Amino acid sequence: MGMNDMVRFFRQMTGRLGSNIYAGMPPHANRQQMSFLRQLQKEMKKENSLDCPLEELPVIVFDLETTGFNPEKGDRILSIGAVKVIGSRILDNEEFYSLVNPEIPVSPAVLKLTSITEEELRSAPITSQVLMEFLNFIGTSVLVAHHAKHEQAFMKKCTSEELRLNFDHRVIDTSFLIRLFQPLVYSLPLEQICLECGIEVRDRHHALADAKMAARLWAFYIQKAREQGYQNMREVYEYLSLIR
């Protein structure tokens, strides 16, 4: 792992919202939303999880279902699912799920894959509303996702377009911990790596179900890391930087 990776990782663990997020807020933003974003910005500046003991490390594991793979070409979010995890403990009573009205046609193949219907999408809240609710749910937490570049790209694009807001939360890929034990693992499908770890695969391509599977995967490797003597994420990173 090189110097650029190091810089990205430290930003990832101490992510912050841009300092000029309010000037471009959309006209429909209300005072409550503005106040929330202002407070979130202050708290993000103080956030530092590198030295938090692994058994106490709070993260939010999330997943998106989307109309395609490229937000820069107009693909949109269809649903967001997320669950809170502390150390290796999944808080099933603290979860987030919402469908999102993409306001564009969705291909039959995607509808079949996700088991989402056109009727459900038409009655779902619009993207800006769901994004604000999701930001409220995640707060300043470190984020985790499987194949995180996908989630990060959509969150950055949609948050910028819908809220005129920089989404500077850094998202850790599940492979970050997996590479402690399987150094060559970068892009295995979620269902494959879950099965290898004895995690049941259910309701694949449902955002909340996938988030819960990814959370179990994260918790599984947090526990393995603790058993190997790692105390915090700084120690994990230092080891990975040596074997890269």
Image: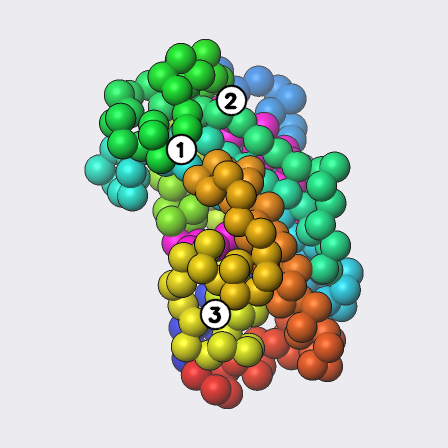
Q: Quadrant of residue 225?
A: bottom right
Residue 223 image-quadrant placement: bottom right
The amino acid type, in three-letter code, at marker 1 is Thr
Q: Is residue 93 above or below residue 184?
A: above
Image spot of residue 168 (x, y percent): 49, 48
Please tell me whether mark 1 sits on a helix, a strand or a loop. Answer: helix
| Residue 221 x/y as whole percent | 62, 67
Q: Badge 3: few (under 14), some or many (20 or more) residues near its Cα, within 10 Å?
A: few
Q: Residue at x 65, y 79 (%)?
A: 235
Q: Is residue 138 magenta?
A: yes
Foreground label between 3 and 2: 2
Q: Earlier in the sequence, mark 2 or mark 1?
A: 1
User: Which of the marked residues, 3 or 1, is nearer the chain's N terminus?
Assistant: 3
Q: What residue is shown at x 46% (from left), y 79% (from top)?
A: 183
Q: Tag 3, which secondary structure?
A: helix
Q: Of the two numbered discs 3 and 2 on the same chain, state the one appearing first in sequence.
A: 3
- Marks 3 and 1 sit apart, C-alpha to C-alpha, by 36 Å
Left or right of residue 195, residue 224 in this image: right
The percent position of residue 216, horizontal first and vertical second, equals 62, 55
- Name the residue type under label 3: Val
Residue 114: mark? 1
Question: Nearest the camera: 142 or 187?
Answer: 187
- Tell me, yes or no, if residue 109 can be seen here: yes
- Residue where numbered disc 3 is placed: 7
Q: Which residues are magenta?
A: 127-149
CA–CA distance between discs 2 and 1? 21 Å
* Residue annotated with mark 2: 129
- From this view, report whether residue 193 is shown above or below residue 229: above
Note whether 224 is above or below 96 in the view shown. Answer: below
**Is residue 226 highlighted in magenta?**
no
Q: Quadrant of the N terminus?
A: bottom left
